[in-house]
Image (cartoon, helix red, strand yellow):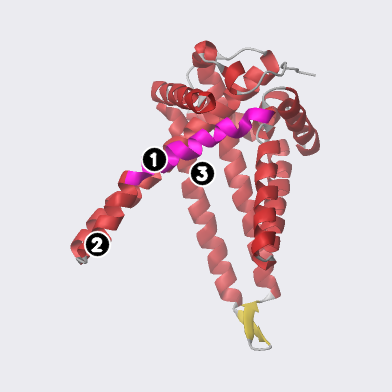
Amino acid sequence: MQRIRNSWELGKISWSVLRSDRTLAWFPVLSGLVSLLVIGVFAGLVATTGVETTDGQESLQAIGWVFVVIGYIVLAFVATYFLAALVHGANERLEGRGASLSGSLGAANAKLHRILPWAIVQGTVSVIISAIEERAGFVGQIIVRLIGAAWAIVTFLTIPIIMMEDLGPWNALKRSGTLLKQTWGENLVAQAGFGLFAMVASIPGIALIAIGVATNEVVALVGLGAIGVIWILVVSVVISAMSGIYRIALYRFAVDGKAPGAFANSDLGGAFGPGKPNSN
């Protein structure tokens, strides 16, 4: 119960930081829009390659799979780039300065030589995990998903590390693992609170869609469905921004040993473990 309370409190603080500087919400919006564009482009490229039939089974042409892999990596880059900009902007906000769209994007641009290699690593890992999961049985899928979850936990701080310490992919990954182990990593489950927030906040949108379907009327389905989808998208944007704020706050706590800015009065130490912060 204590962890749930701490997660709720940290979520509220992240929300208050976002409300104090709504520029931070633009980064997940831009990430989503650019990702949709990338998906459209690569879906079109894959579609033009067609399929081949082998032993009665249809599958993509070899060049189609190449486009799929490249698409994964480009999507990873888009997500990493805008998360890096969000992390920079959130850090500016926590230090008492206003976050600017141009300034945060400029900071991400300055770290492109770090962001791109890390995005390639992330995209490659995603492709491998997806490929294994697709071919695995039920038990295998569970194992692969656990591996994916472990990877997400270990890499949780890599973007703040890249932005704040200017480390390359391998060193950032090692640093993230070190901070995770030495401080509050054993209690990182508190991060799942954001998943709970997203689920609860999405209920009205899901309910509107369900009501629209239940009416069996086209007008109601389109109207309520559109409102429901918009609601869920807004929730996704807000939760993504809050998560970025939360991520840099945890990094600063892990390195500095004290919570930054609006989090100064929160129980970060109690929420994320008794380990001693260590910047080495």
Residue, disc 3: 31
Q: Can residue 240 be seen here?
A: no
Q: Measuring 54% from the left and 36% from the top, which residue is drawn there?
A: 192
Residue, disc 2: 214
Crowdedness near tag 2: few (<14), some (14–19) or many (≥20) residues, C-alpha within 10 Å: few
Question: Amino acid type of disc 3?
Answer: Ser
Q: Main secondary structure of the magenta part?
A: helix
Check residue 200 in the rendering and tell me which mark sits there, or answer none. 1
Q: Position of residue 40 (x, y in %)?
A: 50, 61
Q: Quadrant of residue 184?
A: top right
Disc 2 is placed on an element classified as helix
Q: Is residue 157 above or below residue 130?
A: above
Disc 1 is placed on an element classified as helix
Q: Which of marks 3 and 1 is in front?
A: 1
Q: What stretch is highlighted in magenta?
A: 186-203
Q: Does the magenta stretch include residue 190?
A: yes
Rounded to the nearest angstrom, the CA distance separating label 2 from label 3 is 33 Å
Crowdedness near tag 3: few (<14), some (14–19) or many (≥20) residues, C-alpha within 10 Å: many
